[in-house]
Every structure is written in structure tokens, then in C-alpha cells.
Amino acid sequence: MGIPEAPQLSVDEQLRVLCGLREKTIERVELAADAPHLRLSLTGGITLMIRGNDPDYESWNLGVAFADPSAPPTMVVVGPGGSLAVWARESLAQEASSRRTRG
């Protein structure tokens, strides 16, 4: 079973859906093992799937907002071709890398 296709929405409809998510809390973050597709599980049973792996452009990036200013920055970027770059404290980066390779 593959990833289901999203319904075709106009730009206004897409923006309405995305703006409706702004107050939701991210409960779970998952990264697919075979491609850098990002799945965000939000409050209310909503799932936001962001497909990755563009040959020429960064597909997505995810960072921590409003974090402790003295803490090291945390960001994950999917680069062209599906490469994964992680900026985080050493233990978090190692855990993310090992989970990605285990699938």
C-alpha cells in the first residue's frame, strides 16, 4: 500500500487548511526510512504528510522555535536528492541517524 494522493485543492483552499493547523500541537514526528517523507501527527487526530526527495531543491526543513536561547540550535533539513542534515546536540543527532538507518 503506497501513500494516498492528496485531494486537489485550489491555492486558497490549501492556505485555509494550513492556517487551520497553526494552533495544533505536534504530538509525534516520524521520518520514513526509505525516503525523507515527514509525517506530523497533530492534536485532533490530524496527520500532515510532507513528501521529500526532490532532485534539485531542499524538500523541507524543521526546527525548534522559541527554544532556550542558550541551548544549541536544532534543525533538520532534507537537501537535494534526499540527503539529511541534522543540527542538534550530539546525542540527539546520533539517535536520529540510527533511527533513520534502522527503518
Image (cartoon, rainbow, N blue to C red):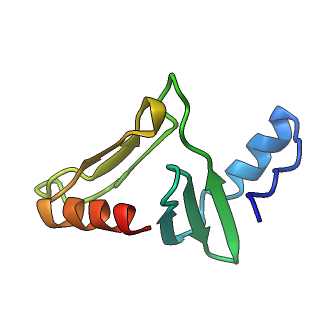
The x and y percentages for residue 63 are: 36, 50
Image label count? 0
Residue beneath the point at 17% across and 53% down: 69
Residue beneath the point at 81% across and 33% down: 11
The x and y percentages for residue 70 are: 10, 56
In the figure, 54 relative to 91: above or below? above
Instruction: Indicate left or right for 73 with 83 as reference.
Output: left
Residue beneath the point at 77% across and 65% down: 1
Residue beneath the point at 88% across and 49% down: 7
Instruction: Indicate left or right for 11 with 102 as reference.
Output: right
The x and y percentages for residue 2 are: 75, 59
**The C terminus sits in image quarter:** bottom left
Quadrant of residue 52 within the rendered picture: top right
Quadrant of residue 25 within the rendered picture: bottom right
Between 103 and 70, the one lying in front of the other is: 103
Between 99 and 47, the one lying in front of the other is: 99
Quadrant of residue 101 within the rendered picture: bottom left
The x and y percentages for residue 81 are: 47, 32
Q: Residue furthest top?
A: 56
